[in-house]
Structures are given as C-alpha cells and as structure tokens.
Image: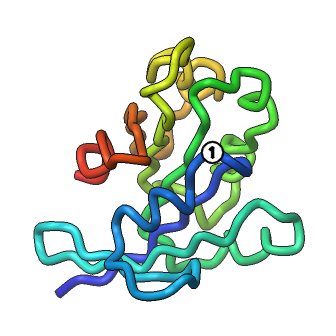
Amino acid sequence: RHESTILMLGLDAAGKTTILYKFMRPNNSTTTESMQPAKNVHFAVWDIGGQPNLRKHYFTDDKSGLIYVVDSTDIQRLNEAQLLGILQEKVMVDVPVVVVANKQDLPNVLKAGDIAEHLGLLKLKRNPLHVQEAFASNGDGLCEGMD
C-alpha cells in the first residue's frame, strides 16, 4: 500500500473539516485522521487550519498533494485566499492541487472556471491542477476530485 500525505487548506468556514469527516470513519474528534478511498491508497490528511502560527507546518517536504477548499458563495473572501503564495514555496513545486469549490448546493455560487480565474490559477503552470465543484455536506463531488 502507498501512503500519501495530503495537505488540506482553505479559509475558515469553507468546509475543510466537513470534507475530512466525509472521508474518514467516524471514530473520534481529532482533525488529523486517515481516510481510505478506493484504489488501495491510504491518505494521511492534516486539517491544520489557517492560523498564522500553524503555517510553518504547511511547508514540509513530504506533501504528495494539496486540497484547497473554498466557499463558492463567498466571492469577497476569495481575495483573501493565499493559494498562489502557498504554491510559490519551493517544497510545493509539482505538488498536485485539487481546489474544492464547496457549497455548490447553495444559490448564487461561483462555478469552477470562475473560481480558477478569481484565484489566479489560469496562469499556474508548475502544478497539476483540478478545480472540483462539490457539496461537502452530502459528499457530492468529493471523490471525483481525488482521482
């Protein structure tokens, strides 16, 4: 079995913890959990939040991927997202990125292409990238984005 370390980031209230709990077996309340999707791959996901004192943990060399969660209804907060800055870090070169455009069940949401444009992802060349529309509360779109 192959183990991958996936970093999950995003602004507060975007749905990171909801996504984490959709992938794990309900067993306790910690935010460092393991999830086991199909294909015999074991993921260790760290949901460490966006507080500045935790940011030093983002940039270790053992990241196999990045899940960046955004609230698709909150266009103003997209300007606060620091995804491009995170991807400028040396240890993030070539790390695959899935942007989860969460809360797609709500009215007036931005779709994947609009979110990619707002985050400046259209000019991103050095990271494999996918923007996945999702509704984390019921799990819609989550597995599709992890393939």
- The residue depicted at 74 percent of the width and 46 percent of the height is 85
Name the colour scheme: rainbow
Q: Residue 50 location, x and y as percent?
A: 76, 60
Instruction: Give the vertical position of 101 relative to 93 (above or below).
Output: above
In the displayed structure image, the side of residue 53 where residue 92 appears, left or right: left
- The residue depicted at 67 percent of the width and 44 percent of the height is 83
| Residue found farthest to the left | 39
Frontmost residue, 116 versus 27? 27
Q: How crowded is mark 1: few (under 14 residues within 10 Å), some or many (20 or more)?
A: many
Q: Residue 25 location, x and y as percent?
A: 32, 78
Residue 3 occupies which quadrant of the picture? bottom left
Frontmost residue, 24 versus 85? 24
Frontmost residue, 40 versus 93? 40
Instruction: Give the vertical position of 30 relative to 143 (above or below).
Output: below
Q: Residue 146 location, x and y as percent?
A: 29, 53
Quadrant where the image shows the N terminus: bottom left
Residue 123 occupies which quadrant of the picture? top right
Frontmost residue, 125 versus 82? 82
In the displayed structure image, the side of residue 117 where residue 103 appears, left or right: left
The image shows a total of numbered marks equal to 1
In the displayed structure image, the side of residue 104 where residue 91 appears, left or right: right
- The residue depicted at 39 percent of the width and 31 percent of the height is 133
Q: Residue 37 location, x and y as percent?
A: 21, 68
Element marked by disc 1 = loop
Q: Name the residue under label 1.
A: 14
- The residue depicted at 37 percent of the width and 79 percent of the height is 26
Residue type, label 1: Ala
| Residue found farthest to the right | 53
